[in-house]
Amino acid sequence: MSMYSRVSSIPYYLSGLFGLRSEDLLLASYPKSGNTWVRFFLCNLISIQEWDGREVSFPLLDSTMPEFGNSNLLRHWPHDTIPRVVKTHKKWWPIFQGVDAILLVRDPRDVMTSYYFYKCGKVKSKFNGTFSEFIRDSNVGVPAWARHYQSWKSRANIFLRFEDLKTDDIYTFQKLSSAINVDVSKSTIKEAVRRSRFEKMKEVEKKYGVRADEEHFHEESQFMRKGRTGDWEEMFSGSDISYLNNVLEENDIDIYT
Ligand code: PPS
């Protein structure tokens, strides 16, 4: 992050400090765990219920669904369809106390694969190194994933797994909707799920472009890369897997092993 973007994000952090409310819901996830998918679904619910089904694009998503530290949380939430769901990639910290949280998790092997390709692509905070170096990096690699997971696991109220979304998106999003007290018909949920599938999001990405923020370049984006589970098998060597398993074991994390 450049000095300019650090300084320009200060008002948003302050709005987060004073604007986060107990009726909000946090959507906590390590980068590349699928938060955009979940937010697309939620934004599609709003669109179907409140905007006559207008097509949701990435810019519309980002201007509707707030992110802690990146959006003005003092603003009124005008939507009745869903509670305000605030994205964060941050580890848990005391400011989040008293706000219910959804923890979205994805197999860290797929997270590392997705994050590596992302960080080697057209982003300003580019990673220059091999995949093996990336997963061992304390700031972005497996140690950072483990710290993030550890900080949230006993604090989150709702667990959501990327893999469950992949297995059955309709069932999993229906469960999420009732857990967060969304009162819409089953057919609305199904329609929002359909509008948030990988191919549809990829089409929307091509049509309207991706994000309008500091980090991303605007020309051809590859945000919607593969959206698969198990893609890691092409990336991890035997020693990479042993390394990851050791970090998970040291941190007493037994999911995905
Ligand atoms: S970010 O940059 O942290 O906000 O990324 P995030 O949205 O958390 O995760 C991006 C990965 O999620 C995949 N994705 C999907 N997969 C399946 N179905 C749908 N609808 C979907 N939407 C996003 C996206 O492709 C990234 O994963 P990879 O493995 O790189 O394709």
Image (cartoon, helix red, strand yellow):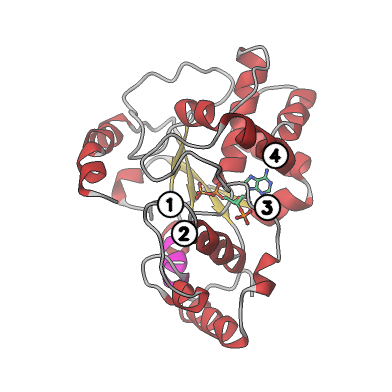
What's the mark number on residue 227? 3
Using the numbered discs, state the Cα–Cα distance from disc 1 to disc 3 in whole angstroms: 19 Å
Q: Is residue 36 magenta?
A: no
Question: Where is residue 175 drawn, in percent x and y?
Answer: 70, 40
Mark 3 C-beta to ligand 1 under 8 Å: yes
In three-dimensional space, the C-alpha distance between marks 2 and 1, rounded to whole angstroms, equals: 6 Å
Q: What is the secondary structure assignment of the residue under circle 3?
A: loop
Q: Amino acid at mark 3?
A: Gly
Which dot, 2 or 3, sits closer to the camera? 2
Mark 1 vs mark 3: give the one in front.
1
| Vertical order, 206 against 159 (above or below) | above
Q: In this orientation, which residue lies closer to the viewer: 115 or 157?
A: 115
- Residue type at the position of mark 4: Phe
Q: How far across and how far down the image is residue 93, in percent?
A: 32, 52
Point 57% across, 86% down: residue: 242
Q: Are marks 2 and 1 in contact (CB under 8 Å)?
A: yes
The reply to whether the C-beta atoms of the residues labelled 3 and 4 are less than 8 Å apart is no
Instruction: Indicate whether 78 appears above or below 199.
Output: above
Q: CA distance from mark 2 to mark 3?
A: 16 Å
Crowding at dot 2, Cα within 10 Å, few <14 / some 14-19 / many 20+, comes out as some
Type of the residue with mark 1: Val
For image coordinates 38% across by 18% down, the residue present is: 76
Disc 3 vs disc 4: which is toward the camera? 3
Q: Residues within 10 Å of mark 4 (few under 14, many from 20)?
A: many
Mark 4 — residue?
Answer: 173
Q: Which mark is residue 119?
A: 2
Q: Which residue is mark 1?
A: 123
User: Whole-percent x and y of residue 150?
Assistant: 44, 64
Name the foreground residue: 67 vs 55: 55
Q: Look at the numbered disc 4 and give the secondary structure of its residue.
A: helix
